[in-house]
Structure formats: C-alpha cells, structure tokens
C-alpha cells in the first residue's frame, strides 16, 4: 500500500480551482502559470479525494470520535467530547463534515466520473463509483434524507431538494453495480494517483463487492431477503487482510492519522470503561494492547460515565498512532457479514461457528495479536453456542473488531442494540438514550430552505425502522 503526504492535498485542491478560469481581454496565452494548470489530471484529483476521505469523510474525528463515544469505545472527559458523552451534538459541530463530504469529496468524484467517461477509462470510472457509493453511504447513514439528484450543480442549483433515503440507497447500489461492471472489463488499465490499491482494478472490484454487501445488509430491518442478497453480494469480496481498502498515514508533520492529531492537540477522550472491561476482565482479549495503552506496565483502565481521570488507558496504536490506517472496508468486516448472513439464512450451525471463528482470527491477525492459546479456548466455547446467543456473539465480536469505525454505529442501530450497550444514566445527559441520528448541519439549515425540519439526535433514518411493539 502506498502512502501520501497530506500536505499535497492543499496543492491538489488549489489546482482544482483552476478548472474555472475566467476569460480576459488580453491574450490568454500570456502569463500562464505552469503551477496552476487549467485542467487537472484524474490521478491528481483521485489522490486528493482519497486523502480527504480518509481524514474527514471516513476517518474524521467529527464522525469516528463521536460515534466511538456513543458506542462506548471512548469516554469524553472534557470540552466538546464531554458534551458528546452527554448526548449533545450541535448542528454547528458537524458543519465541517457535511461541507467537506460534498465539496472536497463528492464534487471531485463527480469530476473524475465525467473525465473518465469522456476518456473511456473504465478503471478511473469504477474507482470513482466505488468511492462515490461509500461517500453517499456515509452521508445518508448519518443524516437520512440528503441532497443527491439535485446536488453537484454549483450555482445552477444552490438549494437542492433532499432525496428520500430509500431513493438514495437505490443510487448507492447502482454506483456499485456500475463499478463491478467497469472493474471487471477485460484489459481494464491500471491508473495513476491511486494511493490505496495502486490502481489495481481487481482489488477495487473486491472492495465493490464488500461494500455492496454492507449496504444491502443495512436494510435488514425492512426486508427478510436482505441476508440472502448480501450473502450473494459477498461473492468476489475482499479475500484477505492484505487486500483491505484502507488509507495509510505516516509520521510527518501534517501527514499523521486524524485521531493521532486530535489526541496530540486536544486529548479530551480516554478509553471507556465498558470497552476496556469487556476486553480485559470478561474476555481477556489479546487485541487489547493494540487497542489501548497500558497504565503502568500491564494495567488497562477506562473511565466510566462522568469520570474524568487522565490516569487511564488512551486509544492505542491500532487507531491512534501517527501512521495508523483508516479502514474504508476490510476483510474482517467481510467475514463478519458472512457469519451473520449464514446465521440468518439458517445455515448449519457448524458452518456459522466456523465463519465466526474465521472472522475473529482475521481480526487477531490484522493487529498482530498473540492469539493461539486464546483461540483454542474460544473455539471450545463457540462450539457450544447456538441460537440467539450465537448471533449476539457474532455482533459483539464485530463490535470489538470494528473498533473506532463508524460502521459499528450502523450495526448497533440496525440490530436494535443486540450487543446490549447501556445508555449514559447521568442527569447531565440530554436524554438517557443513545442517539441514532446526526443533526442537520447549521450551514445547510441557514442557506437551504429544503433542509428537513424537526430532526434531532433520536430521529431514525429510513432503514432504522422502529421495531413493532407487541
């Protein structure tokens, strides 16, 4: 996997500004600045998009820090993070995430799609379609209805309507289906500027299959056929940890992982007691030293609700080192989807257990855990599991494995908290109920009269349907 210097992002975006150069009364061939070309190559735009997605859209602190507090990986102990732990998230808090998703991610992906279509390059088009599906998916999963059919028109439409999430999901699957066709074309060329997969269409094809299964699975509350459809989509999905779709940061000023930078600059989160105790006291999980720092030589301690001690474990190297990766979609997630789908389609219990063990093993191997002895004991335990406890174990292990990934929040909602997280019980909490929705961005509310009203943190997106009461 290739690395990228994040300082280059600014240059890429400045280059993009040149796309709309004005006509002048003088000869336009004079005073041409070679550092501001009138047309930016697709590879340069792609590099900037991937970096922005990793730093903001997929791995950004406005997304992963918030949901990791709600999913009780982290505890907020000061300032904005403490408010997040008390279930306060203001419309102004997520302006940057909302705007960046549209301007720096999806608008630039639209440019690549147009250029690739014009050039007849199926690889660039397929890569952009995969990333667009992921970008739209992140946005709609947190806001529900979003501008899509009327978006990306610039001054031609500054107040687009908000498309219903059901319609948005049709487009997500369409982008992924198109990508699967494009990336499967015989002789599809490698491309420049891809710092995630090195321009390899075969690897992007695997990621497209995994993402398609993910977005089908999100609808599991609405359609009993979801698990069969998702299982079919997993054919051709990511086949090893080495093939994960992830972005690698590195230890140079301005180029580090976003959570690392947050901890260096703010540091108002610690590990949560729920997550630490689950791994340390209940499961003796060998991934813990990668997930959290030790207090002293070997102790692992998390803050509970309302606790603000700094003498506790902090996010570990798996997620908060300068060079920690930001995963978009992985082999581990793919295997957990397979285990869930097998369980829900009534596959033989031995097959479900084997799929779960394979998923946990892949997670252990990804983080270099010393798991051999632990796995022997765990396998004996799993060989007695069946029914609802087996399903809960699948989703609990997935919650552990997807540490600090926003997809854990989606799983929590669509399974109606099968893993059993308890909400903040303190009177300082806005409500003693875990949030399910992001507020509408203040910038969109201010300037777009079509912004949906009456949205709060406990609203439900379309696929997070309320379970019927008995």
Image (cartoon, rainbow, N blue to C red):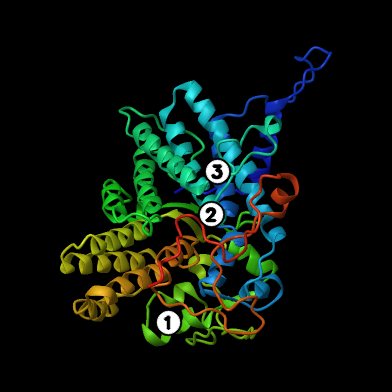
According to the picture, the residue beneath numbered tag 1 turns out to be 278
Label 1 or label 3, whichever comes before in sequence order: 3
| Residues tagged 2 and 1 counted as in contact (Cβ below 8 A) | no
Mark 1 Cα shell of 10 Å, populated few (<14), some (14-19), many (≥20): some
Left or right of 176? Residue 9 is: right
Whole-percent x, y for residue 94 in the image: 66, 57
According to the picture, the residue beneath numbered tag 3 turns out to be 163
Q: Of circles 2 and 3, which is in front?
A: 3
Is any part of residue 184 visible from this angle? yes
Q: Hey, which residue is sitting farthest right in the picture?
A: 25
> Helix, strand, or loop for circle 2?
loop
At x 51%, y 31%, the residue is 113
> Helix, strand, or loop for circle 1?
helix
Whole-percent x, y for residue 359 in the image: 30, 64
Q: Distance between the residues labelled 2 and 1?
A: 26 Å
> Helix, strand, or loop for circle 3?
loop
Left or right of 266? Residue 121 is: left
Left or right of 187? Residue 86 is: right
Mark 2 Cα shell of 10 Å, populated few (<14), some (14-19), many (≥20): many
At x 72%, y 73%, the residue is 79
Q: How far apart are marks 2 and 3 (CA)?
A: 22 Å
Q: In this view, does 225 lie above or below 392?
A: above
According to the picture, the residue beneath numbered tag 2 turns out to be 58
Q: How far apart are marks 1 and 3 (CA)?
A: 40 Å
Left or right of 387? Residue 182 is: right
Whole-percent x, y for residue 431 in the image: 61, 76
Whole-percent x, y for residue 442 in the image: 72, 54
| Residues tagged 1 and 3 counted as in contact (Cβ below 8 A) | no
Q: Nearer the viewer, residue 216 or 246?
A: 216
């Amino acid at each position: 996997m290739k690395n990228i210097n994040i300082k280059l992002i600014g240059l890429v975006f400045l280059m993009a500004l040149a796309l709309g150069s004005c006509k002048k009364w003088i000869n336009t061939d004079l005073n041409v600045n070679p550092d501001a070309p009138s047309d930016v190559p697709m590879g340069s735009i792609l590099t900037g998009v991937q970096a922005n997605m990793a730093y903001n859209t997929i791995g950004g602190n406005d997304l992963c820090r918030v949901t990791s507090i709600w999913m009780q990986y982290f505890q907020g102990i000061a300032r904005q993070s403490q408010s997040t732990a008390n279930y306060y998230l203001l419309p102004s808090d997520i302006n940057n995430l909302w705007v960046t998703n549209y301007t720096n991610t999806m608008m630039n992906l639209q440019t690549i799609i147009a250029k690739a279509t014009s050039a007849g390059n199926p690889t660039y088009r397929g890569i952009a379609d995969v990333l667009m599906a992921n970008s739209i998916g992140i946005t709609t999963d947190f806001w529900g209805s979003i501008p899509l059919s009327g978006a990306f028109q610039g001054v031609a439409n500054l107040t687009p309507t908000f498309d219903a999430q059901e319609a948005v999901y049709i487009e997500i699957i369409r982008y992924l289906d198109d990508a699967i066709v494009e990336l499967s074309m015989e002789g599809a060329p490698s491309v420049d500027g891809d710092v995630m997969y090195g321009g390899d269409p075969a690897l992007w094809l695997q990621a497209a299959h995994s993402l398609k299964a993910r977005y089908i699975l999100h609808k599991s509350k609405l359609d009993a056929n979801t698990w069969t459809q998702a299982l079919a989509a997993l054919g051709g999905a990511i086949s090893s940890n080495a093939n994960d779709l992830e972005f690698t940061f590195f230890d140079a000023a301005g180029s580090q992982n976003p959570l690392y930078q947050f901890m260096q600059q703010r540091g108002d989160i610690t590990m949560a007691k729920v997550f630490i105790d689950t791994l340390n006291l209940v499961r003796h999980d060998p991934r813990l030293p990668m997930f959290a720092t030790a207090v002293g030589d070997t102790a692992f301690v998390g803050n509970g609700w309302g606790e603000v001690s700094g003498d506790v474990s902090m996010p570990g190297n798996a997620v908060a080192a300068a060079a920690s990766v930001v995963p978009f979609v992985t082999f581990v997630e793919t295997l957990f989807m397979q285990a869930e789908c097998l369980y829900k389609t009534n596959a033989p219990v031995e097959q479900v257990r084997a799929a779960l063990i394979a998923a946990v093993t892949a997670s252990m191997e990804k983080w270099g855990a010393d798991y051999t002895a632990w796995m022997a004991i765990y396998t004996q335990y799993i060989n007695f599991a069946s029914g609802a406890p087996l399903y809960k174990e699948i989703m609990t292990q997935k919650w552990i494995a997807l540490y600090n990934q926003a997809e854990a929040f989606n799983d929590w909602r669509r399974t109606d908290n099968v893993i059993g997280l308890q909400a903040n019980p303190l009177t300082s909490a806005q409500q003693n109920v875990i949030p399910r929705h992001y507020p509408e961005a203040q910038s969109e509310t201010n300037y777009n009269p079509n912004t949906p009203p009456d949205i709060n943190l406990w609203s439900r997106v379309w696929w997070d349907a309320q379970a019927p009461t008995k």
